[in-house]
Image: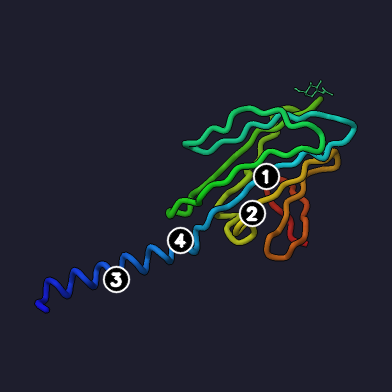
Amino acid sequence: MDASTKFKSGRIVFLLLTGSFFALIFAEVHISVKNRLGSGKNMTLHCQSKDDDLGERTVADGDEFGWDFNANVWGTTLYYCDMGWENLQDYHFDAYSHARDWARCETQCLWLVSEEGMYGLNGQTGFWSTFTSGQVDKI
Ligand SMILES: *[C@@H]1O[C@H](CO)[C@@H](O)[C@H](O)[C@H]1NC(C)=O
């Protein structure tokens, strides 16, 4: 084997290794936002990322809206939503921010919306946490 062949096969092994490394770290994530407002209240939900607009939806009481995505390898994936019902309109929140959620939402990022506030599921602990001021509180 001459030096250049050795170099090429070394590079292929490197690519294969990094490829499976990223596939493990950036597995598919499922996000869902569930309406738990009660009293038959609809909410509107409009979620999007820089290059994926999921459109404005009406989510009925008890229903949820969800989607799947693969986090990008740069670690910058961000899905943000505007939500509203009755007097509360255009409430903005990040449904998935890689920097904040990569560990908490390794495979799923579940949200519950109620009159008392929003709750996010911590996939590592299995506990629901309150969501205030853009942060998922640790409990
Ligand atoms: C909720 O939305 C559905 C479908 O858009 C509509 O038929 C229904 O009247 C709405 N309910 C309320 C309470 O506004």
Q: Return the disc, 2 or 1, that comes first in the chain's sequence.
A: 1
Find disc 1 in the rendering and name its residue. 32
Q: Return the disc, 3 or 4, that comes first in the chain's sequence.
A: 3
Q: Which amino acid does label 4 sit on?
A: Ala
Extreme residue toward the right, this view: 39
Extreme residue toward the bottom, this view: 1
132 to the left or right of 28: right
Label 3 vs label 4: CA separation?
15 Å
Label 4 vs label 2: CA separation?
16 Å
- The residue at the point 71 percent across, 28 percent down is 58
Secondary structure beneath label 3: helix
**Alpha-carbon neighbours of circle 2 within 10 Å: few (<14), some, or many (≥20)?**
many
Q: Return the disc, 3 or 2, that comes first in the chain's sequence.
A: 3
Q: Which amino acid does label 1 sit on?
A: Ser
Find disc 2 in the rendering and name its residue. 108
Extreme residue toward the left, this view: 2
Find disc 4 in the rendering and name its residue. 23
Residues at circles 1 and 4 in contact by the CB criterion of under 8 Å: no
Label 1 vs label 4: CA separation?
22 Å
Instruction: Please state the horizontal and vertical placement of residue 63, each as a whole percent of the image.
Output: 77, 37
Q: Return the disc, 1 or 4, that comes first in the chain's sequence.
A: 4
Find disc 3 in the rendering and name its residue. 13
Residues at circles 2 and 1 in contact by the CB criterion of under 8 Å: yes
Within 8 Å: ligand 1 and the Cβ of disc 3? no
Answer with the quarter of the image where residue 10 lies.
bottom left
Label 3 vs label 2: CA separation?
31 Å
- The residue at the point 48 percent across, 50 percent down is 76
The quarter of the image holding the N terminus is bottom left
Ligand 1 quadrant in view = top right
